[in-house]
Image (cartoon, helix red, strand yellow):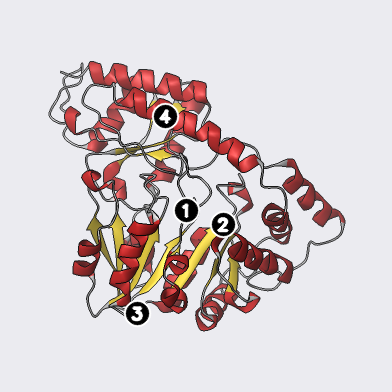
């Protein structure tokens, strides 16, 4: 009898965490490494949010809370959805978890049966397919090529849907590409979904506020109100509010789904941190003026990285609408040799070469379901990004 569960054989460790860990190990060993693998802002959590957490500690808000969120935080989330997305939710339609990742996993665990299919546009966040597999479902990746700006096309969505399809997972702006759907592009997808009433939408809006060049963010239930009861709208405070370590994610949807998610959470982690929840209330209700300031810095970094990567031999880089990632192609390096005679056969070979030769840590595109590409997070100091791009240019130029 095997000791470990068979389900573990269906999944792999997170490649993005693996790259970040490897970079940290090399730094600890004395190597000069620039890590561009982690998807978290380099800005600190705003002081008003920190002060709200301190006040919560000092006032004794250190006990268990309701399993899926305090009434105060749920009210703040409902106000956010109405204010920013035009969506009306009662607090009974809102769940709070330990990060968006937990909320997403809880939703899949609460709804998937063996054989249920989940359509996932590729490139995708590395955790989506493995979560589906852990929950007994079947991931159905749909390739979204660079000539379509890495966006799911209506005809491809239509072709991927079968009688077994339960969910479409949609992430806009996207991790890893930064691509975001305009109103018209989102409406074209929701029109397809209206023809398939058995398909639900799990929309991961974690990068909602990180958009540039006047782009207007939209979410599916906002674009097509008829999908309101079939949509779980997921978000969190990690990215826009620089609170990755605070671990607060949330979602809104129909009451029976929210109750099912709470049931899963009640028998796993129970409530998120009471202190983090108090901080999240301040994040959502408090001043928002730092977000556009941060975005201006992110935009400058995006433009720097895109420009410098497009000057590197064998690399081409799309200019995305949002998030803090770029997803350049390294197709022009495939088949070339490194200075020590190794042939670059895959994008994983290329990112290994970058790390070993120049100390630049990025993540291979194959980890996100599309090769030969690699992901760079530009949520790091501008000086480090500039130096990293110089190193990438140098490494690319050295290939023969």
- Earlier sequence position, callout 3 versus callout 1: 3
Name the residue tied to disc 4: 303
Q: Secondary structure at mark 1?
A: loop
Q: Are marks 3 and 1 in contact (CB under 8 Å)?
A: no
**99 or 355, nearer to the observer:** 99
Tell us which disc is closer to us: 1 or 4. Answer: 1
Residue 195 position within the rendered picture, expressed as x and y whole percent measured from the top left: 28, 77
The residue that label 1 is drawn on is 217
Up-down: is 200 above or below 57? below
Depth check, mark 4 against mark 3: the one in front is 4
Q: Earlier in the sequence, mark 4 or mark 3?
A: 3
Write down the residue under mark 3: 113
Secondary element at image label 3: loop
Residue at point 60% right, 75% down? 266
Identify the residue at image location x=31%, y=64%: 189
> Residue placed at 51% from the left, 79% from the top?
254
**Residue labelled with disc 2:** 236
- How far is disc 2 from disc 4 in space, using C-alphas? 26 Å
* Residue 99, quarter of the rendered image: bottom right
Task: State how many labels appear.
Answer: 4
Say whether residue 356 is visible.
Answer: yes
Callout 4: 10 Å neighbours few (<14), some, many (20+)? few
């Amino acid at each position: 009898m095997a000791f470990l569960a068979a389900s573990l054989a269906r999944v792999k460790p997170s490649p993005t965490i693996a790259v970040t860990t490897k970079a940290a190990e090399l730094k600890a060993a004395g190597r000069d490494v620039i890590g561009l693998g982690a998807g978290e802002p380099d800005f600190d959590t705003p002081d008003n949010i920190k002060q709200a957490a301190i006040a919560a500690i000092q006032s004794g808000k250190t006990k268990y809370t309701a399993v899926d969120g305090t009434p105060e935080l749920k009210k703040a989330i409902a106000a956010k959805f109405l204010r920013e997305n035009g969506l009306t939710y009662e607090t009974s339609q809102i769940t709070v978890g330990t990060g968006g990742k937990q909320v997403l996993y809880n939703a899949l665990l609460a709804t998937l049966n063996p054989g249920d299919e989940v359509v996932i546009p590729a490139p995708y966040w590395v955790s989506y397919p493995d979560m589906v597999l852990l929950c007994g479902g079947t991931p159905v990746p749909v390739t979204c090529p660079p000539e379509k700006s890495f966006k799911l096309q209506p005809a491809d969505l239509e072709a991927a849907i079968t009688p077994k399809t339960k969910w479409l997972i949609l992430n806009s702006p996207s991790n890893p590409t930064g691509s975001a759907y305009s109103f018209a592009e989102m409406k074209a997808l929701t029109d397809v979904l209206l023809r398939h009433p058995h398909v639900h939408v799990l929309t991961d809006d974690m990068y909602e506020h990180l958009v540039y060049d006047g782009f207007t963010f939209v979410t599916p239930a906002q674009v097509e109100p008829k999908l309101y009861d079939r949509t779980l709208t997921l978000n969190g405070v990690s990215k826009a509010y620089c609170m990755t370590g605070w671990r607060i994610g949330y979602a809104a949807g129909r009451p029976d789904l929210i109750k099912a998610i709470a049931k899963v959470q009640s028998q796993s982690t129970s409530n998120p941190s009471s202190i983090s929840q108090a901080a999240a209330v301040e994040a959502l209700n408090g001043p928002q003026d730092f977000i556009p300031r941060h975005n201006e810095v992110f935009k400058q970094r995006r433009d720097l990285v895109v420009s410098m990567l497009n000057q590197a031999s064998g690399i081409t880089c799309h200019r995305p609408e949002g998030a803090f990632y770029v997803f350049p192609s390294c197709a022009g390096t495939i088949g070339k040799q490194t200075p020590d005679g190794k042939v670059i056969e895959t994008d994983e070979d290329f990112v290994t070469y970058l790390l070993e030769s120049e100390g630049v840590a990025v993540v291979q595109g194959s980890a996100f379901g599309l090769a030969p590409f690699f992901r760079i997070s530009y949520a790091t100091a501008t000086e480090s990004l500039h130096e990293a791009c110089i190193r990438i240019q140098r490494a690319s130029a050295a290939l023969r």
